[in-house]
Amino acid sequence: MRLKVKFFRSNGQLNISDIVNFVRSRKGIFQPIRSKCIVSEVHLASAIERSLRRSENGSRIRDPGILILMYLSGSDQIQDAMEQCGIQQDCASFAVVYEDDSDISDFLHAFQYISENDLPIPHDHSNDMIFERMSYVDSILD
């Protein structure tokens, strides 16, 4: 499975309950992530890879989107990961990890106050603590 990432910005306050309902209505992975949680492309790619591997090999957490948030945040608690890396009402910029291109067009149609954004994130950021936290999440989920 190949996941894709797009970045967005909001031109107003996000209606979180409507976005949550939209995410739940998707058949594939569609996970909004607060941009501030993404340190680098390598950080995001590693979180995606680990979550897919974990969900394919059987995990007590079956939603790869939630696993991505857990790896990005370095938290073994779903609620903490969602609070740290999930989008919130005042979130001005965010990324979406997704499977199906039609989900993005549906998303932009449903939320016309949201537009695509080319958010530059560094390719790599050498911070061993980030990957130590990801390994911690791996060890807890075993």
Image: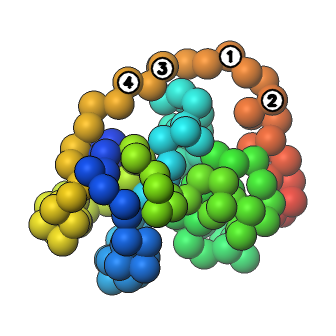
Labels 2 and 3 touching (C-beta < 8 A): no
Locate the C terminus and report the quarter of the image it occupies: bottom right
Q: Can you say whether 94 is above or below 67 in the image?
A: above
Q: Quadrant of residue 66?
A: bottom right
Q: Can you say whether 72 is above or below 62 in the image?
A: above
State left or right for residue 71 relative to residue 26.
right
Location of mark 2 (residue):
129
The x, y position of residue 51, in whole percent, is 59, 56
Residue 123: mark in rendering? 3
State left or right for residue 58 relative to residue 2.
right
Find numbered disc 3 in the image and state the secondary structure of the residue it sits on.
loop
State left or right for residue 77 relative to residue 57.
right
Real-space CA distance between mark 4 and mark 3, rounded to the nearest whole angstrom: 9 Å
Q: Can you say whether 100 is above or below 124 in the image?
A: below
Labels 3 and 1 touching (C-beta < 8 A): no
Location of mark 1 (residue):
126
The x, y position of residue 54, in whole percent, is 65, 60
Label 1 vs 4, first from the N-terminus:
4
Three-letter code for the amino acid on which mark 4 is drawn:
Pro
